[in-house]
Image (spheres, helix red, strand yellow):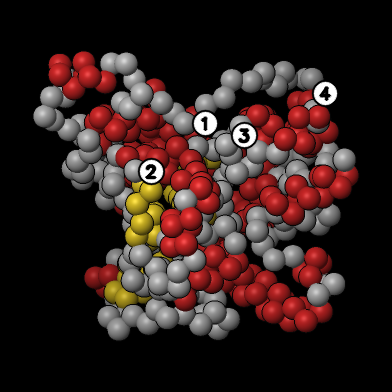
Amino acid sequence: QEQVMQQQQQQFNHRRLDVADAKDKSENDDEVNQMNNAIDASWEKAIQDNPEIQSSQSSPVKIKNVPFFWHIPRSGGTSLSTIFSNCLSLVQASSSLTSPPIYARGEDEALASRFRDPTLYVVQTKGHSFVNVDLDSVEGVQRAVQGGLVSKELADVVLVQDVRLGSLLFGNGEDHIHADNEDISGTEYKGVMFALFRHPLDRTLSFFYHKQQDNESVHYDPSMEIYSLVDWVNSPSYITNFMTRTLVGKMNNQIPLTAVDLDVAKEILRRKCVVGLLDEKAESMKRFARLFGWDADVNHDSLSLLQGEAAASRAKAERWKNQIVNDEECEDKLLHINWLNKHRHPALREGSVEYKVVKSKNSFDLELYYYAKQLFEEQYTQLGFDEDDI
């Protein structure tokens, strides 16, 4: 069992190069250390940069803000990716961990080969438009940088699970990754981070059942069937305080978190993140759409939302004949009726052994989550969402 859990840790540990694992490969030690240092330096530069979403009007350098979604597992990111495609017709640069169509590309060798092409371009798969990159690994991000993903403006939105690694996309690690992305127009590209947050205990419970039962998921592991929730949370494969560890770069459970780490994580959210809440997903999506200009009229064929439903033909004849629905109706359907990855499972009972164990493993994330909820309220006025009805 211990060996299985160690393998799971390697699969889930955020795809970041692990220096300890590389020690047996001495010829790669320098390269691994350099890349890990580049990631650390890139993230440090990103979070110390100007906290405001800048306008290009007051600078000789044109600044272009790029929507940069931090996908916290089991917090609504996969469904948001579907909304980006089905409702907003956005081109995404994403990963296997976030977007199922990218994960499933192995079923089509012709499609898979496009994700190995050194030239980057937009591909269509399963109704989604993606740039042919997979951002869940160091190698994938390097390929995206070298192909000029950001500077060539190939994607409307970037989705990653490792925001530290993803920060390399914006030139913060330029001394370590040589990119074919020179921008003769003098434009500076800045990622604007946004995220959906979910209560850490609910997220953990959902992730457990998702890994255990969803055999079409990138996270599915049949060996999980023999483990209880407490077994998994106490195993090496479970990353305690996932959100806090991600933001401060301490993904190894053996490295203890401190109150200072929590303060740093809170400050990163305050200065750098547009906060959304899974419990307020409709309101959150409206805020994201308004901030990034996605609330313009974007047409979408309503029938794509009705595939497989018995009422499709009747709806076509009676309601949507020769018409298309607007973004709001499309989003409403996906947000409230067909929210993806809904799974019914037992809830954690407060005071139970399971509840106490999961809570003890997420004490920092609980504080960070409640702070994110506070920011969600504050940003309503700070970012101008109160100026009109949204």
Query: Which SS class for mark 2?
Result: loop
What separation in Å lies between label 4 and label 2 (alpha carbons)?
Answer: 42 Å
Q: Mark 1 or mark 3: name the one nearer the start of the chain.
A: 3
Q: Mark 3 or mark 4: name the one nearer the start of the chain.
A: 3
Instruction: Tell me the mark number nearer the camera, choosing from 4 and 1.
Output: 1
Work out whether residue 165 or residue 377 is closer to the camera in this orientation and state it.
Answer: 165
| Residue 267 seen in render | no
Assign the C terminus to one quadrant of the image: top left
Which amino acid type is marked by label 3?
Asn
Give the residue number, with chain letter if any, for mark 1: 341
Give the residue number, with chain letter if any, for mark 3: 215
Give the residue number, with chain letter if any, for mark 2: 126
What separation in Å lies between label 1 and label 3 (alpha carbons)?
Answer: 12 Å
User: x%, y% of residue 117?
Assistant: 45, 69
In terms of image quadrants, where is residue 5? top right
User: x%, y% of residue 123?
Assistant: 36, 56
Query: Which SS class for mark 3?
Result: loop
Which amino acid type is marked by label 1?
Asn
Q: Residue at x 48, y 41 (%)?
A: 78
Can you name the residue that lies furthest to the right here? 2
Q: Mark 2 or mark 3: name the one nearer the start of the chain.
A: 2
Work out whether residue 316 or residue 31 is closer to the camera in this orientation and state it.
Answer: 316
